[in-house]
Amino acid sequence: MNYKLTLLLAFIVFGAQAQKLSEAQIASKVDSLVAIMTIAEKVGQTNMYNGTWEFTGPVPADDNNQLKADNIKKGYVGGMLNVLTAKGTREAQKMAVENSRLGIPLIFGYDVIHGYKTMLPVPIAQSASWDFEGAKRGAALAAQETGASGVHWTFSPMIDVSWDARWGRIMEGAGEDSYLTSVMAKAWIEGYQGDDLSDPLTIAACAKHFAGYAFAEAGRDYNTADVSPQTLYNVILPPFEAAVNAGAATFMNSFNEISGVPATGDKYLQREILKGRWGFDGFMVSDWGSIGELLTHGFAEDSAHAGELAFNAGSDMDMEARIYEFELEQLVASGKVDMSTLDDAVKRILSVKYRLGLFEDPYKYCDDKREKELVYTAETKKIARDVAKSTLVLLKNENNLLPLSKNIKSIAVIGQLAGSKDIPLGNWRAQAIANSAVSVEEGIKNAVSKKTKVQFAQGYTLTTGNRDFVHELTFEDDQGEGFEEAINLARTSEVVVLTVGEDCYQTGEGRSQADISLKGKQLELFNELIKVNKNVVVVLMNGRPLAIPELAEKASAILETWFSGSEAGNAIADVLFGDYNPSGKLPVTFPDNVGQEPLHYDRKSTGRPVTNAFDNGLVFWSHYTDSPNEGTYPFGFGLSYSEFNYSDLNVQSVENGKVKVEVLISNTSKTPGKETVQVYIRDRVASLTQPIKRLVDFKQVEVAAGGQQKVTFELTKEDLGFYNNQYEFVVEDGAFDIMVGTNSMDLMKETINLTF
Ligand code: NOJ
């Protein structure tokens, strides 16, 4: 290349970028760059590789890695995943920037699902906080550690609304409700991306999986999703639209087919809705190999056809199917893919790289010193503990057994999960150090006074050995000697803290379960312990709603703690001993039994809802002959050490079809506390039947001991209307129930007639 051309290219690509570029400046730089790119270079931007080797050493001498390395050097690769550390990403970036003709930087992505090295609670737990600022703070922390480790992009948040506790990935999302998921989507995206994406301590978010992935039939991962337009438009899509509005830099599509069309090849979803109707200007990455799976779905004849379908449908970047790499150039040459479609994808990808500041300085994220200073420190652990406390949900507290006194004489801490320093880290744990969490046992020991005797007994063994990437977990069914030791300890202790639930590898990708009750001997041990001690506090650790009716009936107290991350034990002790007054609320219904799944509170009336006639023994109502309809704990449920009383509900229609809702919250206890006030609506008669209740708003209020607080909401047409089957938003005149309360079952109600 001659000297002048080199200079010209350098100017176009990098320019002089002293400060953040405006969108117009980015657009013009991207246009100039695309204008000088060859087809092969353009295709390269759509190609994403998994970084399978250690970039700080030589490329391993197998053909595949050699090809990948050569292609990076030629500028035929747009992004990589799983390349980590400031040092590693610098080396990989150098290969691209210093060798390729245009020196276009790579974008590095990684699954930072709930923290990079400092583990935050799993996403479903964060959603249980119903705390926008807390979730945002957690995501900002994850971004700080990720950015400081050289990585620009997280494949998070997962905002698939899930109604099915069998689905293992329910742990990765915000639960069963579309509105709550939309709120969390915004919090997570704003947390990751901050105000300036080019700040190396912020990273690009990726809203996934677009769309319908959680509606896998029977809760089995990757299974077919067959959803009605009503569910698609009103339940599945709103969080994704919220993600676009929050500025999500990228999207990921999904493995599943949705009503006959695999999402990766779905033009209606990706081009018409996402990029058209919603005006999304970032790029869409495929899920791992999902372009190739168009063949196994029976949707594409061969790889070339799969590439054509996916690309034309709007999948801009190919994650490891290696199909665009080998087919796209020919597809453009043969006219099956328009050059303008290719240019559009490339411009989207390059724009995100510009927004990240990578053209300004491709190495700006690669700073060893910053990595050392900002990752996994006392400060990051403190934030993790704060976030974790707010995610714990008090499900039962008979006779105010909790909070416990720190001066209690003796506590028996029982259960494999209580002793584990690994399980609380959760699945999808990025760079967490194995066995680095504060266990429940340690947290309790840290909290109590010197006088208190804390003793541990394992009791049951749930799982042993290596559980990650094991396709079928083995649950121990042998009660062994553990039972005797635990029972003896329980007998002689003042209080028992029994931790039961799931191994963290029971949830996550590919971890669906047909049985969601307690595995192994956990329930049997519980039943033995309550025979010898009246004060059994159950600490639940799990990533999905569990069927635990027996625990709910017999335990004195139950605290849901999910997998709460690096500081789990300390955060749990904060709640057990009253340093933090629990404020979490369930983002998912806890079923009575697995047969009720999929189960969600915002269901329809049916023509035969259960009524009093049912109580009188009649048969022909929508019910089970061997199970209740309701779950054990409803959506939105969570107790506090305070007592909140709701009164003075006042619902008024104000101008423009708006509704003003007021309610008085009184804290009748001696403990100050935080309450999440929830508003649900029901459109009584509509042209499409509506859910019997649907969350439309909530607020968190701190109420002083003995204090009162008036809480006001304003509902608008956006809250009161719905999408019809043509994806038009309609608001229909008539009667609406407006319901306000502490959870989805315990509600005050007023009915109001509205004309819009
Ligand atoms: C497959 C998962 O479905 C997706 O969520 C993840 O981001 C990719 N693998 C990359 O690891």
Image (spheres, rainbow, N blue to C red):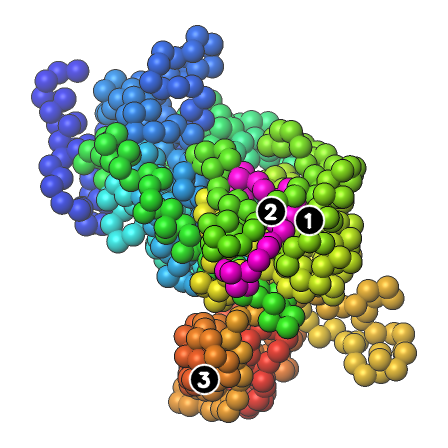
User: Which quarter of the figure is the N terminus placed in?
Assistant: top left
Q: Amino acid at mark 3?
A: Gly
Q: Secondary structure at mark 1?
A: helix
> Looking at the image, is 416 positioned above or below residue 300?
below
Q: Position of residue 564 (x, y in %)?
A: 50, 50
Q: Is mark 1 within 8 Å of ligand 1?
A: no
The residue where tag 2 is placed is 455
Mark 1 to mark 3 CA distance (whole Å): 39 Å
Q: Secondary structure at mark 2?
A: strand
Q: Which numbered tag is attached to residue 442?
A: none
Mark 2 or 3, nearer chain start: 2
The residue where tag 1 is placed is 489
> Looking at the image, is 330 positioned above or below residue 405?
above
Disc 1 packing (10 Å; few <14; some 14–19; many ≥20): many
- As for residue 436 lying within the magenta part, the answer is no
Q: Secondary structure at mark 3?
A: loop
Mark 1 to mark 2 CA distance (whole Å): 8 Å
Which residue is rendered at x = 60% and y = 54% of the image?
411
> Looking at the image, is 450 positioned above or below residue 357?
below
The region drawn magenta spans 404-428
**Foreground of the two, 73 or 113:** 113
Q: Position of residue 162 (x, y in %)?
A: 60, 55
Mark 1 or 2, nearer chain start: 2
Whether residue 716 can be seen here: no
Q: Position of residue 583 (x, y in %)?
A: 49, 67
Disc 3 packing (10 Å; few <14; some 14–19; many ≥20): some
Left or right: where 388 falls relative to 680: left
The residue where tag 3 is placed is 706
Which residue is rendered at x = 24% and y = 44% of the image?
199
